[in-house]
Amino acid sequence: MPVDRLLPTDEAVELIALTRDVADVVQGYSPVDITSFADAMSGQSPMGALIADSMIAAVPGAQVAFMNVGGVRDGVQAAKLYPTDGKTADGIITFEKLKTVQPFGNTLVKGMVSGADLKLLLEQQWLNQPYTKMLQIAGLSYHYSAAAANGSKVSQIALTGGGTSTPVDATSTVRNILLVTNNFLGLSGADGFVQFKQIQPPLADTGLVDLTALANYTAAQSHPPAGSDPGAPLTIPSAQGRVFADP
């Protein structure tokens, strides 16, 4: 069947068994690897940041995105997946490459949260966890101190959309910040992020598959060389500038 460069939003049932035609769909261009290795201090990775950025882009009006670090299963290598592959080339981001990153077919959910919700959710990266689980984030920044007591590690939360930094009142219970995440976190409160279960009304499922959001984003932000066109490489997000480690 014909496959558009920007994939439709209803292909969740096809994620498990990819046809070769779907696997080879070009979804962008990056001549360098996009690594999933997290920065030791911030806990952020370029791949995690890219996924979070794609979530915000996929949901109109979204201000903040959270991605569970365990759901970032791989990075994207610049080299072809198969050296004998004659259909793609180095630097081409194919749908198959992206599926190795997000293979679960989770959907994006959205809802209004408060500054107090954000504070509690960020504290739950440490609170009652067997080990620290750093969320991959977009649209906000914050500071943390690993030496501080559980429940008091996070400070200076700010919204960072549009190139500005707007402080968040971490005591406010007014739910006026549009957050997007996946159903694994947002509806199940999984990985210890139980504060999601306290949000009323509950976050709403958009039906958009997270992999589709990522593929559409990389395709919209880049394209490979063609003829005399040198191509537009994907801008790889920095792991810096989102999370700051204090003493």
Image (cartoon, grey):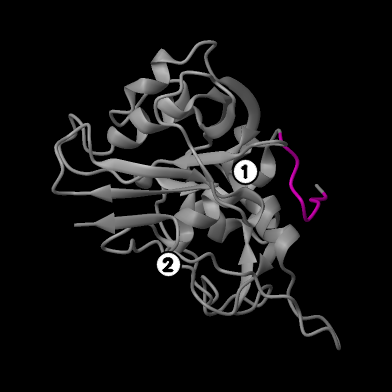
Q: Residue at x 77, y 51 (%)?
A: 6
- Tell me which amino acid carries mark 1: Ile
Judging by the rendered image, the residue that carries numbered circle 1 is: 56
Judging by the rendered image, the residue that carries numbered circle 2 is: 35
Give the mark nearest the N terminus, 2 or 1.
2
In this rendering, would 77 be left or right of 53? left
Asked if one can make out residue 25 in the rendered structure from this viewpoint, the answer is no
In this rendering, would 62 be left or right of 158? right
Above or below residue 191? Residue 216 is below
Query: Front-most of 94 and 50?
Result: 50
Would residue 104 be counted in the magenta stretch? no
From the top left corner, tell me how far across and down residue 64 is, in percent.
Answer: 55, 40
In this rendering, would 3 be left or right of 45? right
Residue 190, quarter of the rendered image: top left
Query: Front-most of 110 and 168?
Result: 168
- Tell me which amino acid carries mark 2: Thr
Extreme residue toward the right, this view:
228
From the top left corner, tell me how far across and down residue 165 is, in percent.
Answer: 55, 51
- The disc at residue 160 is none
Q: Residue at x 57, y 57 (%)?
A: 96
Residue 132, quarter of the rendered image: top left
Mark in the foreground, 2 or 1: 1
In this rendering, would 71 be left or right of 231? left
Q: Residue at x 28, y 28 (%)?
A: 192
Magenta segment: 2-9
Mark 1, Cα crowd under 10 Å, few <14 / some 14-19 / many 20+, is many
The local secondary structure at tag 1 comes to helix
